[in-house]
Image (cartoon, rainbow, N blue to C red):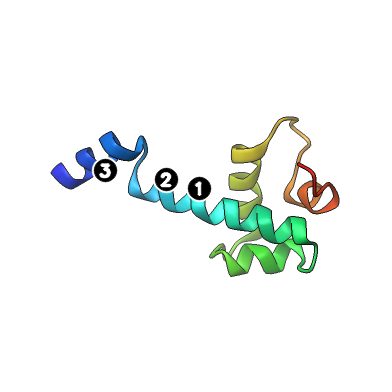
Amino acid sequence: MKLKLVFREIFGTTAFGCLQDYRLEQAKQFLQKGTMTVEEVANVVGYLHLGHFRNAFKSKYSIMTAFSPNDCKINANY
C-alpha cells in the first residue's frame, strides 16, 4: 500500500495509469505513421478488444466527441 501511495505522490497517477498513458502515446505514434490499421495498433499496444482501445484513446485525446483513433491516423498533425 505504501508503494502505491509513494508512486502516486511522485508521478501524479497510479502505476496502471502511467502504463496506460505510455501505451496510448505509443498508439498515437503508430497511428500517425500510417503504416498500421487501428486494429493492428490496438493489438500491438496490448488491447485485445478494439472497443476498449477506442474508448481509452478517445478518453485521453478527445477534443471533440466524434474524435477517434482513425482520425489520428488521418490527421497526423494532431
In the image, 48 versus 62, the foreground residue is 62
The amino acid type of the residue labelled 2 equals Gly
Question: Is mark 1 in CB contact (under 8 Å) with mark 3?
Answer: no
On screen, 38 above or below 65?
below
In the drawing, does residue 19 fall left or right of residue 56? left
Q: Image height check: is 71 above or below 37?
A: above
The residue that appears at 59% across and 57% down in the rendered structure is: 26
Dot 1: within a 10 Å radius of its alpha carbon, few (fewer than 14), some, or many (20 or more) residues? some
Q: Residues within 10 Å of mark 2 (few under 14, many from 20)?
A: few
Mark 3, residue position:
7
Q: Using a 10 Å C-alpha cutoff, classify the residue at mark 3 as few (fewer than 14 neighbours), some (14 to 19) or many (20 or more).
A: some
Check disc 3 and give the amino acid type: Phe
Q: Quadrant of the N terminus?
A: top left
Work out how far the residue at label 2 is from the one at label 3, CA to CA, in angstroms. Answer: 11 Å
Secondary structure at numbered mark 1: helix
First in residue order: circle 2 vs circle 3: 3
As helix, strand or loop, the secondary structure at mark 2 comes to: helix
Q: Which residue is mark 1?
A: 21
Q: Residue furthest right?
A: 74
State the quadrant of the C terminus: top right
Q: Residue at x 50, y 53 (%)?
A: 22
Q: Secondary structure at mark 3?
A: helix
Residue 77 is drawn in which quadrant? Answer: top right
Q: Which residue is mark 2?
A: 17
Determine the residue positioned at 67% across, 64% down: 41
Question: Identity of the amino acid at label 1?
Answer: Asp
User: Could you give the CA–CA distance between mark 1 and mark 3, rounded to whole angstroms?
Assistant: 15 Å
In percent of width and height, residue 63 lies at: 71, 30
Q: Position of residue 61 (x, y in %)?
A: 65, 39
Q: From the viewer's perspective, is residue 49 above or below residue 57?
A: below
The reply to whether discs 2 and 1 touch (Cβ–Cβ < 8 Å) is yes
